[in-house]
Image (tube, rainbow, N blue to C red):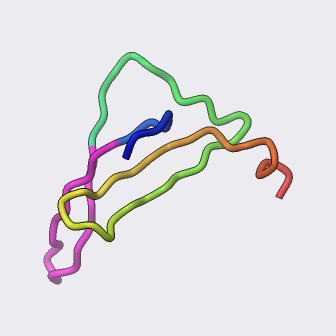
Amino acid sequence: MSNKNLTIDLKARKDVDGLTFYIGRLKGPFVIDCRDGVTFLIFVSEKNNEQLQIAAMEKKDIDD
């Protein structure tokens, strides 16, 4: 997926009960400013292309 969102690739793992969970890691010299809100988009339907995206909230969504 190509966009301006911060994108973190996720890896599927199994817990001790066989349930799937996802893990992603990110390291860098940055700060995520959440004062005006952020949106978390999680894509897990396409195997081996799981992603977490973090985007600034659009103005129209802030007042909801």
Residue 56: x, y in percent? 62, 38
Residue 1 placement, left or right of 14 = right
The residue lying at 50 percent from left, 24 percent from top is 31
The residue lying at 81 percent from left, 48 percent from top is 60
Residue 29: x, y in percent? 38, 16
> In the rendered view, would you say 63 is above or below 13?
above
Location of residue 26 by image quarter: top left
Location of residue 45 by image quarter: bottom left
Residue 19: x, y in percent? 22, 79
Residue 5 placement, left or right of 21 = right
The residue lying at 15 percent from left, 81 percent from top is 18
Location of residue 55 by image quarter: top right
Residue 59 placement, left or right of 40 = right
The residue lying at 68 percent from left, 43 percent from top is 57
Residue 5: x, y in percent? 49, 38
Q: Residue furthest right?
A: 63
> In the rendered view, would you say 30 is above or below 64?
above
Read off the magenta span. 8-24
The residue nearer to you, when weighing 27 against 9, is 9
The verdict on residue 14 being magenta is: yes
> In the rendered view, would you say 25 is above or below 48?
above
The verdict on residue 12 being magenta is: yes
Q: Residue furthest front?
A: 2
